[in-house]
Image: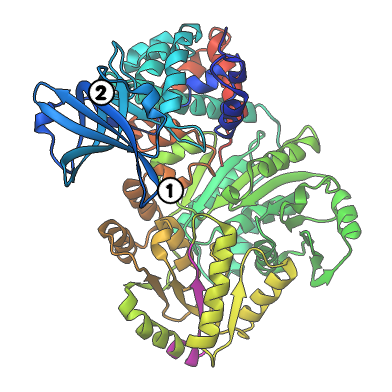
Amino acid sequence: MNLDLPLKNLSYVTPVYAKRLKKLGLFNVRDLLFYFPRRYDDFSAIIPIGKLKAGETSTIQGKILDVQNRKTFRRRMVLTEALIEDESGTVKAIWFNQPFLMRNLKVGQKVYLSGKVTYSEEGLQMSNPVYEIAKRYLIHTGRLVPVYHETEGISSRWLRWQIKRSLNFTNQIKDFLPYEIRKKEKLMDLSRAIKEIHFPQSISLADDARRRFSFSELFLIQLLKLRLKKKWRLQRAYSIGFDEELIKKFTRSLPFKLTDAQRKSAWEILKDLEKTWPMNRLLEGDVGSGKTVVAGIALLQTASKGYQAALMAPTEMLARQHFFEIINLLKDFNLKIGLLTGNEARIFKKKNNSVSREKILKKNQDGDIDILIGTHALIQEKVAFKKLALAIIDEQHRFGVFQRAALQKKYESFSAVAPHLLTMTATPIPRTLALAIYGDLDISFINEMPKGRQKIITKVISPNERENTYQFIKNEVKKGRQAFVICPLIEESESLQVKSAVQEYERLSKEIFPDLRIGLLHGRLKPSEKEKRMKDFIAQKIDILVSTSVVEVGIDIPNATVMMIEGSERFGLAQLHQFRGRVGRGPYQSYCFLLTDSQAGKTNQRLKALLKINDGAKLAEKDLEMRGPGECFGRHQSGIPDLAMTGLSDISLIKKAREAAIGLIDKDQSLKNYPELLEKLKEFSRKLHLE
């Protein structure tokens, strides 16, 4: 028997249970041992029966005096009742609809019971307590009891039994973390950490075990990132020389002055383009901070030297917007700019023309297009470049892991020369966490807004202020302005969010604003329908656009002055800040209304942070502090393992893991002296998908 033994081969796991375990992602003994508890119930304090109090959760030890099943005819329910005695008194325990307990509980047995104490007409009783026959080693009561994520037919009680049986296998697990790192950071060895995380002797030992696993995962992430960075720098890239006169001409052509942060970020990118190894940089800037202009500088510098550049956006709407924005920025420089999405192909040179897909693909392959802008259509097999030197990915976290991997692989396959890579995001990331998540990237921050931008007035709106808010929107529309109404996330379900948006659209159209022009936008519309709604909104044929979170990024409507967000408590601060950034892009005073029915103090505290803070990076720090990293980054969407995700709250742990990884890579880049670690790293990289 070994760690790779399929669970279905264990004598105590029936085929039915094996099928259920698959739903939890558990296939072999190793999976079971590394299936960690989500929390613990503290049943460690055993008290005398005579000291039980109603309303408290307690653990007792006693002898069964009587046990029987009886039926309640009114509710057609089977009650299992047991009378338990210790030296201080007796108490009744009662279980609902579990008649099989009669087979397990016998008169005269010594048992432990843990559960809620309630008051009935007959006195105190324990309702549906967890029970365990007294023995030397307790699993379900009388200790810190692990509680796991469950599925239908697989309870925490069942998992505890199987995991306890499997702990004998821990001596087969080799500790991949080097001894010198464990010693320096005072970390448990792997075998003990597994035992303590499942059945801890104390809460402090449970914390120590979790710290060990959090450190391990953060350390592995850092190792992967650092090795990627070193590998990336071994590749060859085109060296694109800095043309000072060209960039000066570009900045003079702008109707505004670049901010200091834009100039600094552009300079960092231009210096990277000069290197003979590929740039790998993240450009982070708040909504409306001017990232596209900085990207435009990089595109211009690349194209002016005879190379090709590509810009990939996550949606057709955003790709199209970039196309027209880049045309406008670079109209004085005689460049051929292409647009390629699933539904559209265009080429601009002095004028904007629709073309066939075949024509744009041929021209791009021949090197006759300087800048190609598009969606993930750019990574399709038929798209080829002659001399690609720069690839820019906008809102990179919105691309799936496999799409981004395909993009990078495709670019590398064009020639032995890898493109410089610039990724952009408007989603603020706390600087400290950028170390953990983007350890392989150099990062540029645009942390100031263009001068003259008016501050958006933000208000939290309670239910009794709703009518006044509707009247305010009417008044704004009378002035010629426009408004967004965003519908809430419902259980992270796109289909339910769409339903919510459709219902709100109908309500506003018929009951609230029957005299105004209302539009509806959501992710399940056909691309042509989405395009038409946005064109109508831009052309001011729609007064109020009801939308899901599809408008979170990249929508630029200077005439829109009101952002109204329904169920605002369902969104994170960073996302609310993104929505707010969709207004205030023109010369008019703009407003953001956060509607909530929640009375929870914590919710109101979170929303009030938006009233005081207008800086995306500071809001991201606040969101992290108040909600934790799992909620901020999306535990499942991010691909970051659970314990590494937990570790993201501990900045000290991130730094220690990074320092340990740097020290090891500097000493042994190939890790040939650490075979167990190298093997673990390979396994970890297959499972890890960082967004």
Please state if 259 lies on the left or on the right of 655 as rendered. Answer: right
Residue on which disc 1 sits:
632
Per the model, the C-alpha gap separating discs 1 and 2 is 40 Å
Between 8 and 84, which is closer to the camera in this rendering?
A: 84
Between 245 and 677, which is closer to the camera in this rendering?
A: 677
Give the residue at x 58% y 63%. Answer: 550
| Residue 659 in view (yes/no) | no
**Figure quadrant of residue 94:** top left
Residue on which disc 2 sits:
112
> Disc count in the image?
2
Numbered disc 2: secondary structure: strand
Between 82 and 199, which is closer to the camera in this rendering?
A: 82
Question: Which x, y percent locates residue 259?
Answer: 46, 61
Please state if 216 lies on the left or on the right of 399 as rendered. Answer: left
What range is drawn magenta here?
475-488
The quarter of the image holding the N terminus is: top right
Which of disc 2 and disc 1 is earlier in sequence? 2
